[in-house]
Amino acid sequence: MPKIGELTLTSADEFDFRLLIKALGKGEKGSRTLTFAEASLLLEGFAKGKATRAQMASAMMLMRVRGETTAEVAGMVAGLRHTLDEGWSSLAVDIDWPVYAGKREQLPWLLLVAKLLASKGIRVMLHGDSQALPHRRHVESCIEALNITCCTSPQSANTALMSDNIVYVRAGNLAPVLDECRQLHQELGLRSLIQTAARCINPANAPISLRSYFHPGLDNLHQSICEVLFTNGEYHDASIAIFKGLQGETECNPRVSTTITVVNGQAEHTEVSSFSIPTILDGFSGAKVGQAELSNEILALLWREKQPYLANELTALMSRTMIEQALSSITATLAAVLLLLSRKSTMTEPNKNVVITAEQAVDLSLQCWENRFSPIDSPLEQWQNKEWLCAV
């Protein structure tokens, strides 16, 4: 049985989407994978109501059973980006921080890193889908404790960024089609490539974007997705950081060394490099018991306590090992972001900054956390002005 050859693509309004389903499902010998352009058109067609729920569900299942290709996932990312309101891309954001995994027991300590960066003038956009894995503790359920605004439109997000330098946006408010895809996931009881694609949207085209994964092999998939998106002009002048996150979330695990692969793309030229954040809690054990019951208010307590191990209110709720683990997660994650900022600054402003080492990043991370309330002599500001490096 001959395979269906490359199709002549039209606009989503005119295309017959049965052709894509036929290409995917025409028997063992006659079926084939979708091209980048075809996958993008399928997602756009579903968003516009031109591809039906049955067609989208069939395509998702056929790709899932066979195994999705890089071109198919990257095409879905492009399709999602094409459905976004143009207002999202006009936002001034420094760090794109997708938070889709949630954590099984722990609170999302990454929120404290994002809040610290925002307090120093670095603009952060968090986005996720708390309904995709409802049994996990998602960032969205914790943002109120730290007074982080959840916005539903580019206009409200811009207001929040102007005042607080940080915002959280639900995936469905970025691209409503993601809510429809989630409903299909739940109806079918299957995951799909859409859940990987959603993490890669980078709606505001931030120059730094984080990508976390858990299962082996997904690091290579994410790297390949980035390279395809740069090649096809979907990404511009950005550094994409890919790493195995703590319980899959975009937070570094302090118990192990974390290797971060960075895909840098500029003017159709892509380079791949890497660095590692060292183990912060070497030989550490314990601290998992009881963390599932921790209140979201712990985040606010940990944020404001200058001496957490001596704070009665905090120690009444958390053991010393829990506090140590939380602070170590903050240190490791902040160090990773500082290294990304350092490397990015040398690309965009080579005369302004110097690339720091991983050890220096950890040291700077500790100092930034300890001095997070200092209105003057901020270690982060000193580093940005090269003063901090002179003392290292």
Image (tube, rainbow, N blue to C red):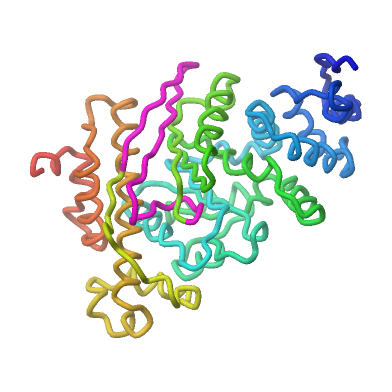
* Residue 320 picture location, percent across and down: 29, 75
Q: How many marks?
A: 0
Residue name at image x 22 percent, y 79 percent: 310
**Residue lying at the far left of the rendered structure:** 391
Q: Is residue 97 left or right of residue 285?
A: right
* Residue 308 picture location, percent across and down: 26, 74
Q: Which is more toward the observer, 386 or 359? A: 359
Q: Is residue 171 above or below residue 353?
A: below
Q: Is residue 253 left or right of residue 37?
A: left
Residue name at image x 47 percent, y 39 percent: 209
Asked if the stretch drawn in magenta spans residue 295, the answer is no
Residue name at image x 46 percent, y 67 percent: 106
Asked if the stretch drawn in magenta spans residue 273, the answer is yes
Region rendered in magenta: 247-276
Q: Is residue 77 above or below residue 130?
A: above
Screen quadrant of the N terminus? top right
Screen quadrant of the C terminus? top left
Q: Which is more toward the observer, 104 or 98? A: 104
Q: Quadrant of residue 32?
A: top right
* Residue 96 picture location, percent across and down: 48, 43
* Residue 322 picture location, percent across and down: 35, 72
Q: Which is more toward the observer, 104 or 82? A: 104
